[in-house]
C-alpha cells in the first residue's frame, strides 16, 4: 500500500495555520461571510426601530442643502437638512411618544436660518431623548475650543487599535446641542465597512461611544458610568446585555437586521399623525412609544448602506454574527491534512465531484447555522480542501508497485 505523502500533509497544515495567524489573510475569510449574509434567510424578528426618510429623493438635492429657506419648504423643495422639515418631522413623531428620536444627518444650518432653527428648537425641547449626529476629526482647528465629551470610566484592555480623534469637525449649533445628546457617525475606512461598524472611538485619551451605541444607551436608559468596556472582548451593559467587540472597537453586524424594521417616509408619518389627531387609531405605529425613531435623509438611503440602522437593530435583537471557535479550524485542518495524501489514490474526476459535493453540503450547513444561531462557519475548511485537491491534480499519480512472479520452467520431456 502506498504511504501518504507527508510533505503534502505538511504543506496543507502550514498554509492553514498561516491563514489563521495572519490578520490580512483572515480578512479574506470574510468574503465567505458576506456571501453567507447575502444568501441567508433573516428570521422575521421585528426590532423596536422605526426608520423615517425625510427630504427629497436621491438626485434632487441642491448643491448646498444647508441653505434651504422657508420659501423652499413651502414650495416642497426643501432639503433633508431643512430646519422646518426637521421640526415638522418632530411634531408628527411626538404624536406617538417615541422613547428616542435620532437624526442621522448632521443638522447644520446657516446663520440666516435662525428663525427656522428656533421652530426646530421649540419642537426638540418636547422630545424626551434626542440624539443628534456629529463628526469627529483627527486634525481639528487649533483655534477651535476643545469639546467636552463624556466617556466610559470602566475600560480595560489595550486602546492602541481604537481610532483616535482630537476634535469635532461638524456638529449642530450650540442651542440645539444644549437640548440633545451627540452621537458620532464617523466610519473610518481602515476599520469600518458594510459588516464592521465602530462602536467606540478614542477622543483625547477617553473612550467614547459612537452614534449607534449612544442610541442604545439612551433607549436602555443607561449612563456611561454603568457600562464596562473590555476591549477585544465585549461591552457589558446592565441587565446582562453584552455586545461582542473587536480590539479596534468594531462590532460584526448583520446588514439584513434592519430589513424587518418599520420604514416610512415623511408624508406617511404626517398622514398617520393627522389620523391620530382625528381620534383614529393607527395600529401600525402604536408601538413607537417604546422604540428608537431614526430619521435618515432620503438621499443617504440610496448613496450608502444603512449601517447605523442595521447596527441598532442588531444590538436590539441580539443578532450578532459570532465566529465559531478557532478549535473548529484546527480540527478541520488536521483532518484535511491527514487525508490529503490518501486523496491521490482517487481519480481526478472522483476528486472533483467529491469536492463539489462537500462544498455544496458545507455551504448549506453554514447557511442554516447562520440563520438559526447567527454563528459564522469560516471558509477556511473549504479552502484547505480545495488546496489539497489542487495539489492532487498537479502532482503525478503514484506508481503502483508490481510483484515479480517467478515462473519455474518445466523439466524437459524425456
Image: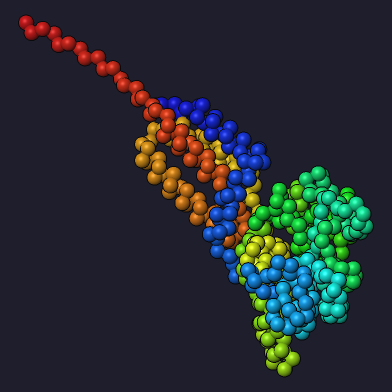
Q: Quadrant of the C terminus?
A: top left
State the quadrant of the N terminus. top left
Q: Quadrant of residue 15?
A: top right
> Residue visible at 86% across and 61% down?
224
In the rendering, at what x and y percent does residue 149 appear? 89, 59
Q: Nearer the viewer, residue 38 or 227?
A: 38
Tell me the residue at 63%/43% (across/down): 26
Q: Residue furthest left?
A: 414
The x and y percentages for residue 310 are 67, 64
In the image: residue 93, left or right of residue 152: left
Residue shown at 62% from the left, 58% from the top: 374
Colouring of the image: rainbow
Q: Is residue 34 visible?
A: yes
Horizontal side of residue 388 vs 237, given as left or right: left
x and y percentages locating residue 174 in the rendered image:
90, 68
Does residue 404 appear left or right of residue 225 in this picture? left
Determine the residue located farthest toward the bottom in the rendered image: 278
Q: Nearer the viewer, residue 75 or 196?
A: 75
Residue placed at 56% from the left, 47% from the top? 379
Q: Nearer the viewer, residue 168 or 72?
A: 72
Disc count in the image? Answer: 0
> Could you say which quadrant of the image residue 121 lies in?
bottom right
**In the depicted structure, whether residue 159 falls above or below residue 57:** above
Q: Front-most of 410 and 40?
A: 40
Give how far across and how far down residue 328 sits, in percent.
60, 44
**In this orientation, does residue 54 appear?**
no
Amino acid at each position: 500500500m502506498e504511504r501518504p505523502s507527508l510533505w503534502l500533509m505538511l504543506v496543507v497544515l502550514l498554509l492553514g495555520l498561516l491563514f489563521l495567524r495572519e490578520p490580512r489573510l483572515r480578512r479574506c475569510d470574510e468574503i465567505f461571510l458576506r456571501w453567507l449574509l447575502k444568501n441567508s434567510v433573516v428570521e422575521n424578528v421585528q426590532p423596536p426601530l422605526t426608520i423615517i426618510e425625510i427630504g427629497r429623493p436621491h438626485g434632487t438635492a441642491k448643491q448646498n442643502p444647508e441653505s434651504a429657506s422657508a420659501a423652499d419648504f413651502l414650495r416642497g423643495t426643501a432639503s433633508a437638512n431643512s430646519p422646518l422639515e426637521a421640526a415638522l418631522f418632530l411634531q408628527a413623531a411626538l404624536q406617538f411618544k417615541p422613547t428616542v428620536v435620532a437624526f442621522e444627518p448632521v443638522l447644520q444650518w446657516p446663520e440666516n436660518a435662525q428663525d427656522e432653527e428656533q421652530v426646530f428648537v421649540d419642537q426638540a425641547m418636547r422630545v424626551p431623548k434626542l440624539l443628534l449626529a456629529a463628526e469627529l476629526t483627527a486634525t481639528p482647528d487649533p483655534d477651535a475650543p476643545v469639546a467636552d465629551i463624556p466617556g466610559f470610566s470602566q475600560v480595560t484592555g489595550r486602546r492602541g487599535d481604537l481610532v483616535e480623534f482630537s476634535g469635532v469637525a461638524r456638529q449642530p449649533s450650540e442651542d440645539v446641542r444644549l437640548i440633545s445628546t451627540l452621537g458620532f457617525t464617523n466610519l473610518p475606512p481602515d476599520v469600518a465597512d458594510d459588516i464592521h461598524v465602530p462602536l467606540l472611538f478614542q477622543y483625547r485619551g477617553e473612550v467614547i461611544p459612537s452614534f449607534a451605541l449612544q442610541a442604545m444607551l439612551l433607549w436602555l436608559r443607561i449612563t456611561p458610568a454603568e457600562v464596562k468596556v473590555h476591549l477585544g472582548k465585549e461591552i457589558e451593559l446592565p441587565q446582562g446585555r453584552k455586545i461582542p467587540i473587536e480590539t479596534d472597537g468594531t462590532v460584526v453586524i448583520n446588514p439584513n437586521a434592519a430589513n424587518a424594521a418599520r420604514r416610512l417616509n415623511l408624508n406617511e408619518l404626517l398622514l398617520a399623525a393627522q389620523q391620530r389627531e382625528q381620534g383614529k387609531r393607527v395600529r401600525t405605529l402604536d408601538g413607537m412609544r417604546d422604540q428608537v425613531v431614526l430619521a435618515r435623509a432620503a438621499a443617504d438611503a440610496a448613496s450608502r448602506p444603512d449601517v447605523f440602522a442595521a447596527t441598532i437593530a442588531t444590538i436590539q435583537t441580539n443578532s450578532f454574527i459570532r465566529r465559531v471557535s478557532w478549535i473548529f479550524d484546527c480540527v478541520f485542518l488536521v483532518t484535511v491534512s491527514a487525508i490529503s495524501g490518501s486523496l491521490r489514490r482517487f481519480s481526478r474526476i472522483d476528486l472533483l465531484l467529491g469536492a463539489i459535493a462537500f462544498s455544496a453540503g458545507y455551504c448549506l450547513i453554514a447557511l442554516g447555522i447562520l440563520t438559526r444561531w447567527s454563528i459564522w462557519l469560516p471558509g477556511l475548511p473549504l479552502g484547505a480542501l480545495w488546496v489539497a485537491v489542487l495539489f492532487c491534480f498537479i502532482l503525478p499519480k503514484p506508481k503502483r508497485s508490481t510483484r515479480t512472479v517467478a515462473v519455474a520452467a518445466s523439466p524437459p520431456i524425456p
